[in-house]
Image: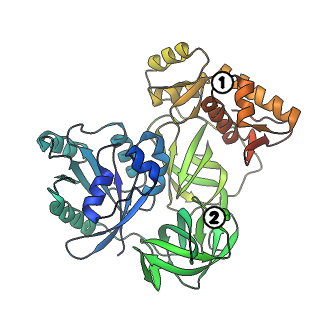
């Protein structure tokens, strides 16, 4: 049974160093990653276990700015390798990554307590076992190779405990990377969720609606006749330019899956949800509205998805707030569309963010407490415009009015134009425009934006 293991953990806790020590492969391939010393994109490597079994390994970023990339990598994995620095112990992204794994249904894995050559691991191991009681915790050092054999054996035991997933069904591969190789052409990589794929297969890239033919298939950089569900694969494609493909698309058997803007789902909430959230499904990230009625939850997404019953969706707004399990990927729309009923608020101390809001004085600020920020947004007192960033409602409405007026006057607006009109930093202008895109007020076309509907500004 092919399996994929994914790393998880806080930034600078040693995930990539550990992957390099285990596999011999440096997954930080980008110059920016090597310059800054942190992972930005997903990395991949084969991992051989003591029995000779080979796993696909995905290394994810740990920085809070790249949680969306972590979710894209964690989607489709079978077991986790949680990394905790022996000196620092569990930190903010340790806890959020664990929450994401649980919401995705990834319950099996191993905890690696790293950098034990510089600290006594006893306390860190105890905290790791308390944090994840069901997982083995192993003390390791990527620098001295201490504990690496024990870690491989622990991963072997975790893999043996896994119950086989239901991977039956038509081919579905979520794309997380697209690039061009000389002499080969366009290559797409991703985890094969179901079915199989081989040379000569005709697939459809959805929701782009592009037909492609598979020229060749590789697993762990080795050519294969066919790849099976559960494997990390790279497929060389003909029939579509690289510009028409990208992360978030799914390569599927033609006609096998519906492309949908609505998902009926079961919801598991960690905190109160604001009216709009960011939904992560497969390798897609999009804005979603949560509609509650008749005891069910419906997610209405801005960008179309390729979903199936049982799929997991992670819902975020600055931090991870909930997860959903798809029940019906293409429910029939009703004639009436009632306003969404908001979740009952979880008691949250908002005083800290209220103080930050007052001190910001109408300017962009980073909310220290994401749950409190979510509660204040639910109350209509602030608007979050990016992971951790917010504006008070009045400032956002003024900015929206300025952007809408310029679009009505000139037809479009650029980022530089918005910055000048708002009299704010480029960062603030960009976050405001991205929020307007997500709210359906504006539509981005290249480096310009226009109103999605002339004269209709939508609502935040």
State which quadrant residue 275 falls in.
top right
In this rendering, position of residue 297 left or right of residue 338: left
Residue topped by disc 2: 245
Q: Nearer the viewer, residue 412 or 325?
A: 412
Residue 348 position in % (x across, y down): 44, 24
State which quadrant residue 327 falls in.
bottom right
Q: Quadrant of the C terminus?
A: top right
Residue topped by disc 1: 424
Badge nearest the viewer, 2 or 1: 1
Query: Can I make out residue 207 in this image?
Result: no
Residue 207 position in % (x across, y down): 67, 63
Query: Can I make out residue 118 in this image?
Result: yes
Q: Secondary structure at mark 1?
A: loop
In this rendering, position of residue 119 left or right of residue 422: left
- The structure residue drawn at horizontal position 62% and vertical position 29%, both measured from the top left corner, is 428
- The structure residue drawn at horizontal position 11% and vertical position 42%, both measured from the top left corner, is 122
Does residue 242 sit above or below 11 in this rendering?
below
Q: Nearer the viewer, residue 61 or 367?
A: 61
Q: CA distance from mark 2 to mark 1?
A: 34 Å
- The structure residue drawn at horizontal position 24% and vertical position 38%, both measured from the top left corner, is 89
Does residue 138 sit above or below 369 in this rendering?
below
Q: Secondary structure at mark 2?
A: loop
Scheme of colours in the image:
rainbow
Q: Quadrant of the N terminus?
A: bottom left
Residue 81 position in % (x across, y down): 30, 55
CB of mark 2 within 8 Å of CB of mark 1? no
Q: How would you rate the neighbour count of disc 1 (Cα within 10 Å): few for under 14, some for 14-19, many for 20 or more? A: some
In this rendering, position of residue 109 left or right of residue 407: left
Q: Nearer the viewer, residue 349 or 183?
A: 183
Q: Earlier in the sequence, mark 2 or mark 1?
A: 2
Residue 323 position in % (x across, y down): 48, 48
């Amino acid at each position: 049974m092919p399996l994929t293991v994914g790393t998880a953990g806080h930034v600078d806790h040693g995930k990539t160093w550990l992957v390099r020590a285990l596999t011999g492969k440096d997954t930080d391939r980008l110059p920016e990653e090597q310059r800054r010393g942190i992972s930005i994109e997903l990395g991949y490597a084969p991992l051989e276990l003591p029995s000779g079994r080979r796993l696909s390994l995905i290394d994810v970023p740990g920085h809070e700015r790249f949680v969306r990339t972590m979710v894209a990598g964690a989607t489709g994995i079978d077991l986790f390798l949680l990394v905790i620095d022996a000196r620092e112990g569990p930190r903010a992204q340790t806890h959020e990554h664990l929450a994401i794994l649980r919401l995705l249904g990834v319950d099996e894995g191993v905890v690696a307590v790293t950098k034990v050559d510089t600290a006594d691991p006893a306390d860190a191991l105890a905290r790791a076992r308390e944090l994840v009681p069901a997982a083995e915790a192993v003390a390791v050092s990527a620098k001295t190779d201490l504990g690496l054999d024990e870690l491989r054996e622990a991963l072997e035991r975790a893999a043996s405990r896994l119950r086989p997933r239901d991977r039956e069904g038509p081919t579905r591969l979520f794309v997380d990377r697209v690039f061009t190789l000389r002499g080969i052409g366009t290559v797409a990589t991703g985890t094969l969720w179901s079915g199989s794929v081989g040379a000569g297969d005709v697939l459809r890239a959805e929701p782009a609606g592009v037909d492609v033919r598979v020229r060749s298939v590789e697993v762990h950089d080795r050519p294969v006749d066919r790849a099976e569900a559960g494997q990390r694969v790279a497929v060389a494609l003909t029939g579509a330019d690289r510009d028409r493909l990208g992360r978030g698309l799914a390569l599927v058997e033609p006609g096998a899956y519906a492309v949908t803007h609505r998902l009926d789902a079961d919801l598991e909430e960690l905190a109160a949800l604001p009216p709009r959230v960011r939904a992560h499904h497969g390798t897609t990230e999009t804005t979603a509205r949560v509609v509650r009625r008749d005891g069910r939850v419906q997610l209405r997404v801005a960008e179309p998805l390729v979903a199936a019953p049982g799929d997991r969706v992670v819902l975020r707004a600055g931090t991870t707030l909930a997860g959903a399990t798809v029940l019906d990927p293409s429910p029939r729309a009703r004639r009436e569309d009632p306003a969404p009923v908001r979740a009952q608020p979880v008691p949250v101390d908002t005083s800290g963010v209220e103080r930050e809001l007052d001190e910001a004085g109408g300017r962009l600020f980073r909310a220290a407490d994401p749950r409190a920020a979510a509660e204040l947004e639910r109350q209509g007192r602030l608007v979050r415009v990016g992971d951790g960033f917010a504006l008070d409602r009045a400032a956002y409405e003024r900015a929206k009015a300025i952007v809408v007026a310029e679009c009505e006057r000139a037809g479009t607006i650029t980022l530089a134009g918005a910055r000048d009109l708002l009299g704010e930093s480029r960062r603030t202008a960009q976050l405001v425009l991205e929020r307007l895109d997500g709210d359906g007020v504006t539509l981005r076309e290249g480096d310009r934006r226009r109103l999605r509907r002339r004269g209709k500004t939508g609502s935040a």
